[in-house]
Image (tube, rainbow, N blue to C red):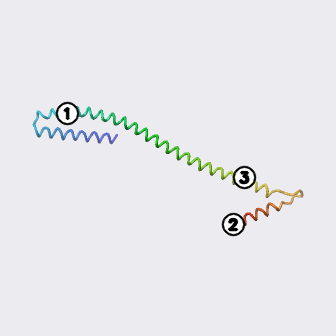
């Protein structure tokens, strides 16, 4: 709206300058003539303004579509990252659960099964190297 206001103000000032120049050059009789020319020019201006608004609405729709597509793309990327993190978390949780089951396994007499404990210690030593 501000842009529209400044544009209108510019046209008004140009019109006033044109009228002032017309009165200075040829006197009061020619001051009527630019007014008529400007009236027809105003009609052309409103026509141009209407076509510009139509084009502007198309461009706004295009901008809106582009913005929506970009937002959709960002949302899809974000969802992919969240999904990957969730899968990784589930895998880690399953691995921990499996390890916990092996570590708590007992023999018939209630003694811990050392096989899994030794494997776990060996894996951590190999992982640290």
Q: Earlier in the sequence, mark 1 or mark 2?
A: 1
Quarter that holds the N terminus = top left
Helix, strand or loop at label 2? It is helix
Residue 78 percent location from the top left of the image: 56, 48
Q: Check residue 37 in the rendering and tell me which mark sits there, or answer none.
A: 1
Q: Earlier in the sequence, mark 3 or mark 1?
A: 1
Q: Residue at x 46, y 40 (%)?
A: 65
- Say few, some or many: other residues with alpha carbon within 10 Å of mark 2 (under 14 / 14 to 19 / 20 or more): few
Q: Residue at x 43, y 40 (%)?
A: 62
Q: Residue at x 19, y 31 (%)?
A: 36
Helix, strand or loop at label 3? It is helix
Instruction: Say which residue label 3 marks.
Output: 94
Q: Earlier in the sequence, mark 2 or mark 3?
A: 3
Q: Residue at x 46, y 42 (%)?
A: 66
Going by the image, does 47 lie left or right of 99?
left
Tell me the CA gap for discs 3 and 1. 84 Å
Going by the image, does 78 lie left or right of 102?
left
- Say few, some or many: other residues with alpha carbon within 10 Å of mark 1 (under 14 / 14 to 19 / 20 or more): few
Query: What is the residue that sits farthest to the bottom in this orientation?
Result: 129
Residues under numbered marks 3 and 1 in contact, where contact means CB atoms less than 8 Å apart: no
- Say few, some or many: other residues with alpha carbon within 10 Å of mark 3 (under 14 / 14 to 19 / 20 or more): few
Q: Note whether 58 is above or below 75 in the view shown.
A: above
Query: What is the residue that sits farthest to the left in this orientation?
Result: 27
Instruction: Say which residue label 2 marks.
Output: 128
């Amino acid at each position: 709206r501000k842009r529209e206001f400044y544009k209108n103000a510019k046209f008004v000032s140009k019109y006033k300058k044109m009228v002032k120049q017309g009165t200075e050059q040829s006197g009061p009789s020619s001051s009527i003539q630019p007014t008529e020319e400007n009236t027809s020019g105003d009609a052309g201006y409103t026509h141009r303004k209407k076509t510009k608004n139509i084009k502007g609405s198309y461009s706004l729709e295009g901008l809106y579509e582009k913005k929506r597509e970009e937002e959709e793309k960002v949302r899809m990327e974000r969802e992919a990252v969240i999904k990957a993190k969730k899968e990784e978390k589930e895998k880690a949780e399953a691995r921990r659960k499996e390890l916990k089951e092996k570590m708590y396994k007992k023999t018939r007499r209630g003694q811990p099964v050392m096989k899994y404990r030794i494997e776990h210690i060996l894996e951590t030593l190999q992982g640290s190297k």
